[in-house]
Image (cartoon, grey):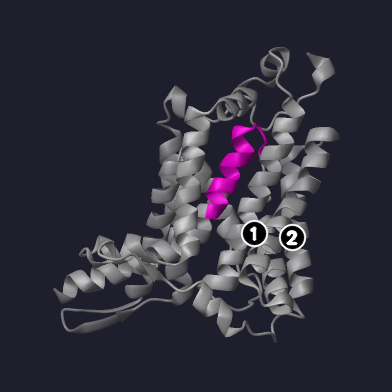
């Protein structure tokens, strides 16, 4: 019984550890389904983390802090959208610049944040909320039904995005734009409007992922608080094959691997104590991501490939 309790607690923490990754993946899916390749996820998450924490210190209101984080991420994505959609700039370079921009802004703003402390209202507001009866299920109860409302929202968002892209007219329209914007434009769809809306929404979701770290998971301000989570999210967009439901499993698996590596840093075997460098152990989830990603991309079916027009700028007059 004690083993089941320990396993349940481990899975609960794994979900919490992977939640910000899930937000980053969902934001990336919103970008890429519209045909926009964005490597600026890390920058938007840092913008969300820093502005969310700043708003939390100023207003002491959890809802305002979360909204400020999302809007900060959208502001970063708006810069990206203007350059790549309106001005036809290179999407890869612009994404890298956005990451640099977000890192710089967060570092500058962070100089005034490190001494601040969140009020008790935040710990109460974001505390895990156990769902009666369901949270008592062995192993999976704590994992799925005893989490912060922020975690529940991330799962709900993933499910909603899945149905949006597969069951709604607007979702199918944006998928058509990601595959062939010229054909979508010829059929009467406003390609530029769809791209702008989904880029802004993707930035908002990435900002929420950053705010989860600074407001819920840590919760305090740390320099480079995302620690490369945005880059992992970019890789996992491909790993989950642009499927929001698979994104949940990918993010939670990464969280579980991070937790497992931490537990294996020091262990005893055959009466001997073994220990590994924390830096080396921390590398393992990222290395595993790269290896699995390389393997997966060699076995993609056609229906699981990236949108055909991903990364290609669309100029209406060139049709």
Q: Specify whether residue 40 is in view.
A: yes
At numbered mark 1, what does the secondary structure look like: helix, strand or loop? helix
Out of 163 and 284, give the one closest to the viewer.
Answer: 163
What secondary structure is marked by label 2? Answer: helix
Rendered location of residue 157, percent (x, y): 50, 48
Left/right placement of residue 258 relative to residue 142 reads right
How busy is the neighbourhood of tag 1: few (under 14 within 10 Å), some, or many (20 plus)?
many
Looking at this view, is 283 or 148 the one in front?
Answer: 148
Magenta run includes residue 293? no
Span of residues in magenta: 23-37
Residue 302 on image: x %, y %: 45, 23
Q: Are marks 2 and 1 in contact (CB under 8 Å)?
A: yes
The residue tagged 2 is 102
Q: Of helix, strand and loop, which mostly describes the magenta segment? A: helix
Going 22% across and 72% down the picture, which residue do you hit?
5
The residue positioned 38% from the left and 49% from the top of the image is 249
Label 1: which residue? 45
User: In this picture, is 88 found above or below 71?
Assistant: above
- Do we see residue 313 in this rendering? no
Say whether residue 142 is left or right of residue 285: left
Mark found first going from the N terminus, 2 or 1: 1
Position above or below: 37 against 108:
above
Q: Residues within 10 Å of mark 2 (few under 14, many from 20)?
A: many
Percent position of residue 8, x then y: 26, 67
């Amino acid at each position: 019984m004690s083993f089941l309790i320990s396993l349940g607690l481990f899975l609960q923490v794994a979900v919490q550890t992977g939640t910000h990754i899930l937000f980053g993946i969902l934001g990336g899916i919103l970008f890429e389904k519209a045909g926009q390749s964005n490597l600026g996820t890390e920058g938007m998450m840092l913008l969300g983390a820093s502005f969310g924490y700043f708003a939390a210190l100023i207003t002491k209101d959890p809802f305002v802090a979360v909204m400020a984080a999302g809007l900060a991420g959208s502001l970063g994505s708006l810069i990206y959208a203007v350059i790549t959609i309106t001005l036809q700039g290179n999407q890869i370079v612009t994404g890298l610049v956005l990451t640099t921009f977000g890192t710089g802004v967060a570092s500058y703003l962070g100089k005034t944040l490190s001494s601040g402390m969140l009020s008790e209202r935040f710990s109460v507001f974001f505390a895990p909320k156990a769902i009666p009866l369901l949270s008592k299920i062995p192993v999976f109860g704590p994992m799925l039904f005893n989490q912060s409302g922020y975690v529940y929202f991330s799962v709900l968002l993933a499910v909603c995005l899945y149905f949006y892209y597969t069951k709604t007219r607007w979702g199918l329209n944006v998928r058509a734009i990601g595959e062939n914007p010229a054909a979508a434009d010829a059929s009467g769809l406003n390609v530029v409007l769809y791209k702008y809306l989904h880029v802004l929404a993707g930035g908002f979701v990435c900002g929420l992922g950053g705010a989860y770290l600074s407001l819920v998971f840590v919760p305090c301000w740390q320099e480079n608080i995302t620690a490369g989570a945005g880059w992992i999210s970019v890789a996992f967009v491909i790993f989950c094959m642009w499927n929001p439901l698979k994104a949940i499993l990918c993010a939670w698996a990464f969280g579980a691997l991070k937790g497992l590596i931490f537990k294996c840093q020091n262990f005893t075997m055959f009466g001997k104590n073994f220990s590994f460098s924390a830096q080396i152990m921390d590398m393992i989830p990222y290395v595993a991501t790269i290896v699995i990603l390389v393997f997966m991309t060699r076995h993609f079916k056609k229906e699981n490939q990236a949108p055909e027009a991903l990364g290609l700028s669309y100029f209406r007059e060139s049709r």
